[in-house]
Each structure stands twice: as C-alpha cells, then as structure tokens.
Image: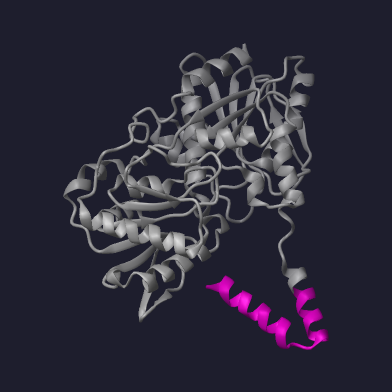
C-alpha cells in the first residue's frame, strides 16, 4: 500500500510540480534513501588469535530478528545445526553465530530457540553482534565458517587466509548456503557484480544448494565451486500432518494466490493482470472467490464488482486450513528455484498454476501443477481457467512426490560432515 502511494506521489510530482520543486523533492529523496546494498561489502575483519583446542563451527548471517525469520533463514539455521550435530558425533565442537549487520532489532533468540529444540544448551552458544563495518573476530585453528549471503561471504573470506597464516595450517573451506541466485536480486548493478564475485572469488568454496534446479542454473551461469552439496525442498514439518487430510477436505470454489507485492520476483503485477483477464474472459467462474496469502496488501478489483482480498501472513496452521479449503492455487516466481508455495499448494490438493524458468520446467513433478511459459495475461488466465475446470472435474489427488515428503531432509549431510572432518584433520 505504501509503495503504491509513493509511486503515485512521484508520478504526480513529475507531472505537475514546477522544476525547482521537483529538484527539491529529488534531493530530499536522495538524502532519505538507504545506502546502496553493496556498501555492506568491504568490511575489514581483523583476526584475533584464539588458541582454544576445540573445533568450532561459526554461522555468519547479516542479522537475526523476529521480523527476519523467513523461510530461507530458518532453513539455513536448520542446516547449520544439523551439520554441527553430525560433527559432534565424532569430536567436541563449539557453536557460534555472528550477525554482521547488527542493529537495534538484533535478537539471537531465533537461533537459540532452534538450537534448544535440537538439544543444544543455549548458554553454550557464543553470539557476536557486529554493529559497525570493521571489527576484531576471534578465530581458532579449527574454526569453520558458514556464510549466508554474498556480502558475508566476501567479507569473511579474507579471514580464512589470515587463519591459515596465523596457525600455519592448510586453508579451510568456506561453506556458503546458496538458496537463491543472488545476482538476480540486484539486476545489472554493482551489487549484481559483487554477488557474482561471491561465487567466483573465494578459494576452497563449498556450496550448499537449495534444489538441483538452482545448482544447474548456477553452473550454467559460469560458476563453479570446489564441492557442491544439493538438496531438494521438503515439506515443512508443521504442514506434513495435514497431507493426510487432502482427499477428505471440503473444497470451496476458491483460488488462493501467493501475493507479495513488494517482492519483485513473485511477479505480483503479472498475477493481477492474469486474474483480471481470467475474470473478464471466463464468466462461468464468476461465483469463485479469490484470496491472497503471503504479505498483507490492499484489496484489488477484478472487475464486475469482484475483488481479491488479502489474508496477509498466516500462521502455519491457518495456512494449512486455507490450503485444504481452496481448489486452485496460483504462485509465480521469477527464479530457477522452484519456491515453496507451489509445492505446498500442489501437495495439498490444489490445482496449481506456476511458471517455468531456465532449469525449472516442472515436468513430471506433480500432476496438480499446471506450468506456464509466459506471464502474459492471456496465458495466465487460460491456465487459471484450466485449473478451475480440472478441480470441478475430479477430486484432488493426494499423490505426493516422494522426494518432497522424504524424512531425510538433507541427504548430503553425511558426505559434508565427513568432508569437514577430513579438512579439520
């Protein structure tokens, strides 16, 4: 809502304000704009020698706060703690988490609660909040660093050279949790180039890739890592019990969309255009209602007095109930990663419209998925109509993709733990 209002104000200023006023507005906007994202790169971390004998695994994230706990952060924490647990089976290992962009919102509670659920003593976990660009960081001989995004990777990488020099040891690997092709988040910019360099600059880079689609795209984009560990997305543990209800749930004539207007890769404008064209071209579905989940936003009109209303961000239980009560799902993502909402919708029995992308074609993944190659309004509208018709013609299938419902979330973990143990040895 705020973004729409700001866009309208900018348009009005450009169209009607005299030149001097436009200049004032632009200077004010420039003064209030946040610093470029790539300003995060270039922090100087100085090694502070720590002669403790025990090995340590250190997770480096930009920040942790209650508002930052989206799926990628939680997945990253889970992978890291699983890694620690595997290493701890054969040797004593300490745990540390560093937030490099700490501010007033920083709260390590998200990490500590997850660790406690896995049997760790929160009091034994070291935390370090770095509120400025340059800082001393204690480093042991056997410190293994796991980074979360491009600037934590670029900023931590020199510490590994310093570690090798300070302790006269072979350089340890830098482990990078790669859950999206980050350069695409900063199109054709200096941040884009820096994000690419995070894949190409570090020595002994080991990448953990969230999906084979993403790894293949990474490889085709000209990058390579010394070692790669790949896993396919798996159903959220809180949603898993609801899979048993797919065949027996009462379905409404309802379309559920994944609506996040502020996240450009979720293609919200295309989603709006496709739904409006669907409402206009397929009046036989005028009795269907459309709701949006993901991020709260203003309702928008479909025409003929109909509108899409937002449910906002739902708890997992409320989200499961909403899925089980809907018949059709629509979730778009301009990314090689499959993204989680289409997988959840399809497995919860919704005929699900989503898009293809290079390295992501959805062939054979799930019978409920209807994939489109184009996001033009006509193609989207036709796919949504086909999904509505399919939902009326037959009951939803609860047949899961075995890979999505597997119990072993990280099949690569045994190999990774063994490789880390060998590197430390």
Left or right: residue 365 compared with residue 134: left
- Model colouring: one colour
Identify which residue, 396 or 144, lies in the foreground.
396
Is residue 249 toward the left or the right of residue 331 in the image? Answer: left
Taking depth in this image into account, of 260 and 391 the one nearest to the observer is 391
- Residue 29: percent from the left, percent from the top? 74, 72
Percent position of residue 142, x then y? 64, 20
In terms of depth relative to the viewer, which is nearer, 65 or 313?
Answer: 313
Is residue 294 visible in the rendered structure shown here?
no
| Residue at 75%, 46% in the rendered image | 133
With 341 as the anchor, is 5 left or right in this view?
A: right
Residue 38 in picture, x, y percent from top left: 74, 50
Write the start and end of the magenta stretch as one range.
Answer: 1-28
Q: Is residue 265 something one can see in this rendering?
A: yes
Predominant secondary structure in magenta?
helix
Residue in the foreground of this view, choosing between 110 and 245: 245
Please say whether residue 17 is one of the residues in the magenta stretch: yes
Residue 263 against residue 158 in the figure, above or below? below
Q: Residue at x 63, y 34 (%)?
A: 220
* Count of marks overlaid on the render: 0
Q: Is 296 colored magenta in this rendering? A: no
Residue 276 lies, with reference to residue 103, above or below; the image says below
Q: Position of residue 36 (x, y in %)?
A: 74, 56
State which quarter of the image contains the C terminus.
Answer: top right
Is 382 situated above or below 97?
A: below
């Amino acid at each position: 809502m705020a973004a729409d209002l700001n866009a309208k104000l900018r348009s009005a200023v450009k169209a009607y304000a005299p030149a001097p006023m436009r200049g004032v507005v632009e200077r004010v906007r420039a003064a209030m704009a946040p610093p470029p994202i790539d300003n995060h790169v270039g922090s100087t971390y100085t090694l502070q020698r720590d002669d403790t004998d025990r090995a340590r695994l250190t997770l480096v994230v930009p920040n942790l706060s209650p508002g930052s706990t989206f799926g990628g952060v939680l997945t990253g924490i889970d992978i890291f703690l699983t890694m620690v647990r595997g290493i701890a089976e054969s040797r004593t290992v300490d745990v540390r988490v560093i937030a490099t962009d700490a501010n007033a919102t920083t709260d390590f509670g998200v990490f500590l609660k997850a660790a406690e659920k896995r049997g760790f003593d929160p009091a034994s976990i070291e935390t370090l909040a770095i509120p400025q660009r340059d800082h001393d960081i204690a480093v042991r001989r056997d410190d293994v660093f796991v980074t979360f995004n491009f600037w934590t990777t670029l900023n931590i990488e020199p510490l590994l050279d310093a570690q090798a020099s300070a302790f006269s040891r072979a350089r340890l690997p830098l482990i990078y949790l790669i859950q999206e092709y980050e350069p695409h988040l900063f199109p054709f910019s200096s941040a884009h180039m820096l994000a690419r360099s995070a894949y190409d600059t570090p020595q002994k880079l080991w990448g953990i890739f969230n999906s084979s689609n993403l790894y293949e795209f990474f490889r085709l984009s000209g990058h390579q890592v010394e070692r790669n560990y790949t896993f396919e997305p798996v159903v959220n543990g809180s949603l898993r019990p609801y899979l048993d209800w797919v065949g027996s749930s009462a379905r409404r004539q309802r379309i559920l969309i994944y609506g996040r207007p502020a996240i450009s890769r979720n293609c919200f404008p295309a989603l709006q255009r496709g739904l409006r064209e669907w409402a206009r071209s397929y009046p036989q579905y005028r009795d269907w209602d459309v709701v949006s989940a993901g991020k709260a936003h203003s309702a928008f009109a479909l025409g003929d007095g109909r509108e899409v209303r937002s449910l906002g961000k739902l708890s997992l239980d409320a989200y499961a109930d909403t899925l089980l009560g809907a018949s059709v799902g629509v979730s778009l993502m301009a990314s090689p990663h499959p993204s989680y909402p289409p997988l959840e919708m399809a497995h919860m029995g919704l005929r699900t419209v989503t898009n293809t992308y290079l390295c992501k074609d959805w062939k054979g993944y799930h019978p409920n998925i209807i994939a489109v190659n184009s996001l033009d309004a006509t193609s989207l509208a036709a796919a949504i109509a086909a999904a509505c018709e399919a939902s009326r013609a037959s009951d939803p299938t609860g047949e899961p993709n075995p890979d999505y419902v597997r119990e072993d979330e990280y099949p690569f973990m045994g190999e990774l733990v063994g490789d880390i143990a060998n590197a430390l040895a």
